[in-house]
């Protein structure tokens, strides 16, 4: 039986692409970095804020990563939800998962993840919220997933992780959980082929869980 469902945050539960892009342009712009588009930004996110800033600045500006990071966090903290919204069907799906334990595992800092979920009225749905600084390793390491499982004394085959990137799928595979990829997020669907299931709408998750628990569904690695 599936007992806990773990979700990635950015690109899975919420579309935060505009607010992250705005924060990047605010922080990096004064240092000669050209203005980033939303499309460029979503191609870089997923490995945490420090790595995001490193990729934007490049090796030639590596020395200023700490100050740009501080500027980004300062601005982003004040503009977390200017344009960020849950994806269609997220709230309804979380309501429909009332009998499951639920967790967020994000590579965004825990404080920012919690604040964003709170601002959007989503924090109430989750038993556990982990960020990049909550565990000694972040996705694609399985350690954040294992922390959630340990908190509830669950086994890997009693868990599902839902995400939009290979970092989520790789973490789930390494931990031994079921993996569900969403095709509408920040990553191209081609990078998600290793997932047990690929869904185009978050609402499909409820049916997948019900059928898994009934033993009526086998994993498929095609969309």
Image (tube, grey):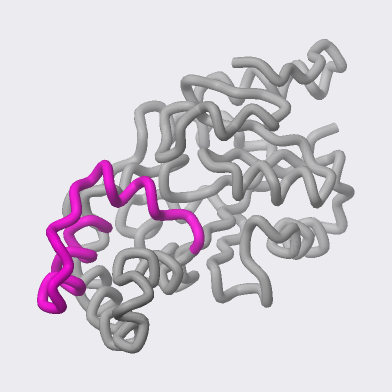
Residue 86, image x, y percentages: 35, 40
Which span is picked out in magenta?
20-47
- In screen coordinates, is 157 left or right of 11? right
Residue 19, above or below 32: above
The residue furthest front is 60
State which quadrant residue 54 falls in.
bottom left
Q: Is 108 in the magenta? A: no
At horizontal 43% and vertical 63% (from top left) the residue drawn is: 113
Instruction: Report the magenta stretch's main SS.
Output: helix
Q: Is residue 150 above or below residue 74?
A: above
Residue 180 position, x and y percent, is 64, 32
31 or 93: nearer the eye?
Answer: 31
In the shown orientation, is residue 53 left or right of residue 95? left
Q: Quadrant of residue 15?
A: top left
In the rendering, at what x and y percent does residue 191 appear?
A: 56, 34
Q: Position of residue 122 (x, y in %)?
A: 42, 49
In percent of the image, x 17 and y 68: which residue is there? 33
């Amino acid at each position: 039986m599936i007992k806990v469902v773990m979700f990635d945050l950015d690109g899975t539960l919420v579309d935060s692409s505009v607010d992250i892009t705005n924060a990047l342009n605010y922080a990096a712009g004064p240092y000669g970095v050209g203005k980033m588009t939303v499309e460029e930004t979503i191609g870089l996110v997923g490995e945490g804020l420090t790595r995001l800033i490193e990729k934007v600045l490049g090796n030639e500006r590596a020395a200023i990563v700490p100050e740009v990071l501080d500027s980004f966090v300062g601005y982003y903290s004040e503009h977390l939800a200017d344009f960020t919204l849950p994806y269609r069907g997220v709230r309804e799906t979380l309501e429909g998962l009332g009998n499951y334990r639920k967790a967020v595992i994000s590579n965004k800092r825990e404080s920012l993840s919690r604040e964003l979920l709170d601002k959007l009225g989503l924090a109430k749905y989750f038993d556990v919220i982990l960020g990049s600084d909550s565990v000694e390793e972040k996705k694609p390491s399985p350690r954040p997933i294992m922390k959630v499982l340990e908190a509830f004394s669950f086994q890997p085959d009693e868990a599902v992780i839902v995400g939009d990137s290979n970092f989520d799928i790789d973490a789930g595979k390494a931990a031994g959980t079921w993996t569900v990829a969403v095709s509408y997020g920040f990553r191209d669907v081609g990078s998600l082929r290793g997932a047990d299931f690929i869904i185009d709408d978050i609402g499909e998750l409820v049916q997948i869980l019900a059928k898994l628990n009934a033993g009526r569904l086998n994993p498929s690695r095609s969309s």
